[in-house]
Amino acid sequence: MAYSPLVRELIDAFRCLPGVGPKSAQRMTFALLQRDRNGAQRLARALEGAAEGVGECEQCRDLTEAPICALCRSDQRNHAVLCLVENPADIQALEEATDYRGLYFVLKGRLSPLDGIGPAELGLEVLATRFAQGVVREIILATNPTVEGEATAQYVAEMARDANIQVSRIAHGVPLGGDLEYVDSGTLSHAFAGRTHYG
């Protein structure tokens, strides 16, 4: 079907979002243009404002409008403990699910030489500077349990040990309420190897 240039441009713009294919982009375009013009204008303003006004924190690399984010500025957080995550969304997940009161560092990905993602792309020079300042005493590695996530965790752990910083890794394994028979073998093996004393 031949769309007008502006409609085609909007469909193509939606396709830049992860998991949005041609049909989903088309549905979103038509929903906004046919039924919710006010929503479309609000979305356009919000996108423009965020694209122009949101940057990254100079200390943790989280998304923020200020040079230093609210968490890094807070006197209520433990500045000696640093949790490393892959994405800004991981911070929100940990804040909602745990009582963690330290700071974070956002890698914005994981080491993947085949994709051209090395230490420089993950901001590890910024992390090394933080380590050298002598404030951080412990890091918690909260990268995802993928091959790349584990490689990234190992790389950062070596950096931390070289700076005499204590290293811990979040546990991975059987989900709460899960049945062992339905857990994949890799997860089960990892959970079994990482077992802790009970009682």
Image (cartoon, helix red, strand yellow):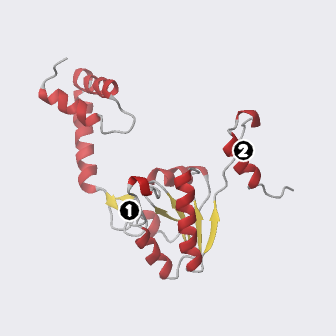
Q: Is residue 146 left or right of residue 31?
A: right
Tell me whether circle 2 and circle 1 mark residues in contact (CB < 8 Å): no
Name the quarter where the N terminus is drawn.
Answer: top left
- Taking the spot 58% from the left edge, 69% from the top edge, the residue there is 157
Q: 26 above or below 173?
A: above
- In the rendered image, residue 47, in percent from the top left (x then y), is placed at 26, 44
- In the rendered image, residue 130, in percent from the top left (x then y), is placed at 46, 76
Please state which amino acid type lies under the numbered disc 1: Glu
Specify the quadrant of the image occupied by residue 196: bottom right
Q: SS at mark 2?
A: helix
Is residue 102 in view?
no
Specify the quadrant of the image occupied by residue 33: top left
- Taking the spot 38% from the left edge, 39% from the top edge, the residue there is 18
Q: Nearer the viewer, residue 39 or 180?
A: 180
Q: Which mark is residue 121?
A: 1
Q: Nearer the viewer, residue 104 or 143?
A: 143
- In the rendered image, residue 78, in percent from the top left (x then y), is placed at 56, 71
Specify the quadrant of the image occupied by residue 117: bottom left
Q: 136 above or below 66?
A: below
Residue tagged by mark 2? 188
> Dot 2: few (<14), some (14–19), or many (≥20) neighbours within 10 Å?
some
Q: Residue furthest right?
A: 199
> Dot 1: few (<14), some (14–19), or many (≥20) neighbours within 10 Å?
some
Please state which amino acid type lies under the numbered disc 2: Leu
Q: Residue furthest left?
A: 5
